Image: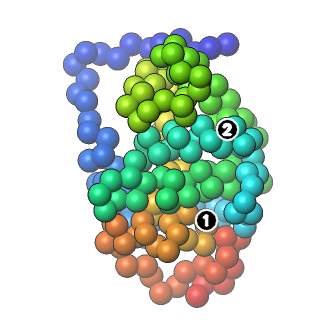
Amino acid sequence: MAPTPSQRPESTPRIDRREVLLRASALAAAAGLSLSACLRQTRAFAADAPRVLTDAEWVTMEAAQETLWPAGPGVPGAKELNATRVLDAALADPDVPPIEREWVRGWIPALHELAKARGAATFESLDAGGREAVLVAFRERDEGSGWIRVVLGYTLEAVLGDPVHGGNPGEIGWRWAGYEPFDLRPTSASGGAPK
């Protein structure tokens, strides 16, 4: 069953997404957080193939995450940060309830539905502005806002998490945020002894 649109009061202020993300990431980096990685360790995963997402879902998720966290001058984007790899690995973690895994995957078709309403074959075939418009429309649906928050959370893990978890390659997210890593860090995604 497709979600129904929800009404947002006209008086609700628009928030500049980039500013919110910049402040949230700087705060989390300063605190040494890796968002949900603080709660559980992501198991080691293959770099070449999706573990939970299908190939088609991967492409769509990658486009959604790049729309939520786009590259900019001096700012690494979600794709460069391996955000979809982090999300897929986190969903493959046996501690993640299957219902959460299916919930994240289950809303991907809604992005395609909204893209088709705009005359595109798929969400990822839209240009950046079209993808953003679809995400704004999707946010107004019953579960759209929650889905975007969850996907954005995994995206922030790729920005701020230790590279051992598959995101933030070469510590590019940390360098962008001006974060200096602690001396004690995990040596493996499954929680090996600190360096």
Looking at the rendered image, the disc whose residue lies closer to the viewer, 1 or 2, is 2
On the rendered image, what quadrant is the N terminus found in? Answer: top right
Q: Is residue 15 left or right of residue 56?
A: left
Circle 2 residues within 10 Å: few <14, some 14–19, many ≥20: some
Q: Amino acid at mark 1?
A: Gly
The residue indicated by pointer 1 is 166
Instruction: Give the quadrant of residue 192.
Output: bottom right
Above or below — where is 7 with respect to 165? above
Q: Give coordinates of residue 150: x percent, y percent.
A: 53, 41
Q: Is residue 142 left or right of residue 56?
A: left
Circle 1 residues within 10 Å: few <14, some 14–19, many ≥20: many
Q: Give coordinates of residue 184: x percent, y percent.
A: 52, 85
Residue at screen point 41% across, 48% down: 69
Instruction: Give the quadrant of residue 30.
Output: bottom left
Residue at screen point 37% across, 79% down: 180
Looking at this view, is 125 or 171 the one in front? 125
